[in-house]
């Protein structure tokens, strides 16, 4: 499955594959190829419809994935994917609400963004809107925000020429991000529209990142650069992100597509 080209393999079972198997399956030349593996199991309580875990292409488990949550809701909906319904998806961090809309797009309640550095975690003496980080002999200014997983957001004049691969790889593993981080490069076109590229932790640059879009909008709203209803233009297409401000959840809206089904020997 994929959400704007951010692609997944969705599997159901009792126990997920080990790291070596995930890396083998993720290889785009010799395996299936994917950015993340979504592992689905039976719900852990009566209040949810399914329980899921997310694994990056490098085999490491991560906390959350917005595009993945949309794909899971689409997967559960099956042939009723154009029928409105609210799905409750359990995951290690809590519960995500995913609403399948009549137009086929899926809106996901991603929860409230957390700017406390400890929530990422990010090493800082105190919470600030922007931080200065020394990396490879230069100083980078960034916002730090958790969407259930760690994000850094960097304002740039042009995402097309931004050093996403070089700087993203350095910042992802920077010592101030003990659990590594996803690095977003955001160009503000207007208060209601941004361009965004994201270097994802354990994957590299992807065509889209749902939590990265949410983190970018949350940072932009907090800095007074964005409105509460933003179109996020990523290399793979557009997402809608709505955030009314502190005390409110971020809603992520976009497509989810089933690419193919098959059988793999584990």
Image (cartoon, helix red, strand yellow):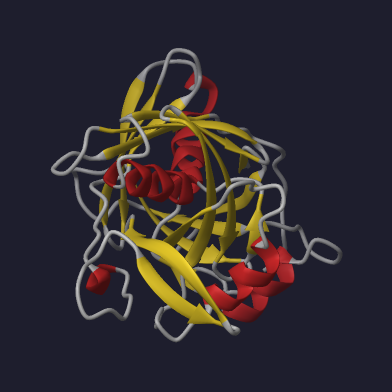
View extreme (left): residue: 247
Say which quadrant the N terminus sits in: top right
Q: Residue at x 58, y 74 (%)?
A: 59
Say which quadrant the C terminus sits in: bottom right
Query: Residue 76, located in which quarter of the rendered image?
Result: top left
Q: Residue at x 63, y 37 (%)?
A: 4
View extreme (right): residue: 29
Observer-nearest of 262 and 95: 95
For residue 150, say whether it is visible.
Answer: no
Q: Residue at x 54, y 81 (%)?
A: 135
Above/below status of 189 relative to 175: above
Query: Residue 101, located in which quarter of the rendered image?
Result: top left
Observer-nearest of 185 and 253: 185
- Left-right relation of 225 to 6: left
Q: Residue at x 74, y 58 (%)?
A: 33
Observer-nearest of 49 and 265: 49
- Left-right relation of 158 to 99: right
**Residue 178 placed where, x, y %?**
39, 83
- Left-right relation of 141 to 187: left
**Residue 198 placed where, x, y %?**
57, 55
**Residue 155 placed where, x, y %?**
49, 52
């Amino acid at each position: 499955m994929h959400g704007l080209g951010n692609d997944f393999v969705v599997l159901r079972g009792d126990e997920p594959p080990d790291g070596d198997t995930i890396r083998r399956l993720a290889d785009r030349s010799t395996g299936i190829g994917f950015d993340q593996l979504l592992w689905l199991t039976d719900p852990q309580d009566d209040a949810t419809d399914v329980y899921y875990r997310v694994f990056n292409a490098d085999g490491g488990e991560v906390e959350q994935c917005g595009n993945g949550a949309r794909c899971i809701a689409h997967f559960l909906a099956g042939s009723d994917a154009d029928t409105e319904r609210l799905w409750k998806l359990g995951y290690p961090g809590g519960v995500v609400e995913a609403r399948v809309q009549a137009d086929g797009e899926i809106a996901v309640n991603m929860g409230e963004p957390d700017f406390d550095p400890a929530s990422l975690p990010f090493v800082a003496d105190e919470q600030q809107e922007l931080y200065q980080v020394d990396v490879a002999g230069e100083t980078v200014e960034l916002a730090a925000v958790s969407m259930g997983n760690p994000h850094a957001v960097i304002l740039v004049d042009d995402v097309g020429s931004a050093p996403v691969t070089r700087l993203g790889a350095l910042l992802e593993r920077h010592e101030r991000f003990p659990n590594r981080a996803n690095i977003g490069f955001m160009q503000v076109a207007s208060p209601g529209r941004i361009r965004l590229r994201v270097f994802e932790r354990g994957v590299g640059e992807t065509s889209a990142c749902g939590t990265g879009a949410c983190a970018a909008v949350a940072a932009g709203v907090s800095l007074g650069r964005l409105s509460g209803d933003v179109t996020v233009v990523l290399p793979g297409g557009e997402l809608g992100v709505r955030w009314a401000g502190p005390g409110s959840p971020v809603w992520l809206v976009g497509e989810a597509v089933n690419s193919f089904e098959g059988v793999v020997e584990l």
